[in-house]
Image: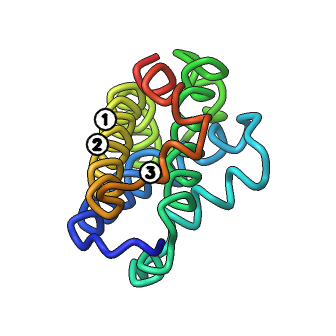
Amino acid sequence: MAINAVNLFPIVEELSTHYKNNLSNRFLRKALNQLTLSRSDWELIDDLLESSDFVRMQSYSYVELYERIYACAQLVDKTRTEIGTNIRAFAGVSVFSGSQQTDKVLLDMAVSNFASNMSIFADAIHNLYLKTVEEDKAAHKGGSPDFLRVPELKNIGKMLVG
């Protein structure tokens, strides 16, 4: 069943903006690319968060949206377990000089705020998941909602909370 829940779109848009500005920026992308996420997981994440055209989301089924949410939850979980507090080392901090001082300050800010920005991202993913489940249940009144068909979702709370 295709999603027809316009109240999910602003959540995805907010999530996308936060991801682009605070997690997948030029200072932190190198660290994120070192995570052991599969190529298909990265494609699902990019499909949900890097797309500027959320009209495409209307053609997702609930199962497809759950797959994308789960991939984002894996990003959160793997970031916490594989990078943890060593984000500075993974980001490839190098020596800056002269005109690059602005970049050094921006890098320091990105690294310093990484943990809190990842927590905000995790909370937003959790919010999207809960709202999607709510919409899924409403769309399948009397029937079986699609989230029951994705067994991996039973671990999503643990993955997002850490």
The alpha-carbon separation of the residues under discs 2 and 1 comes to 6 Å
Q: Quadrant of residue 44?
A: bottom right
- Depicted 95 relative to depicted 124: above or below: above
For residue 121, above or below residue 18 = above
CB under 8 Å between discs 3 and 2: no
Residue 116 found in image quarter: top left
Residue 115 versus residue 101 in the image, above or below? above
Residue 79 left/right relative to 56: right
64 up-or-down from 104: above or below: below
**Where is mark 3, residue-wise?**
144
Please give the residue where the numbered disc 2 appears in the rendered image.
127
Residue depth check, mark 3 versus mark 2: number of the one nearer the observer: 3
Residue at 46%, 45% in the rendered image: 23
Pick whichever, 80 or 101, lies toward us: 80
List the residue tagged with mark 1: 123
Disc 3 marks which amino acid?
Ser
Residue for point 39% across, 47% down: 22
Callout 2 secondary element: helix
Mark closer to the chain start, 1 or 3: 1
Within-10-Å neighbours for mark 1: few <14, some 14–19, many 20+: some
How far apart marks 3 and 2 lie (CA) works out to 21 Å
The residue depicted at 29 percent of the width and 69 percent of the height is 9
For residue 100, side relative to residue 113 (left or right): right
SS type, badge 3: loop
Question: Is the Cβ of the residue at disc 2 closer than 8 Å to that at disc 1?
Answer: yes
The amino acid sitting under disc 2 is Asn
Residue type marked 1:
Asp
Question: How far from the left and from the top, in percent, is residue 110?
Answer: 41, 38
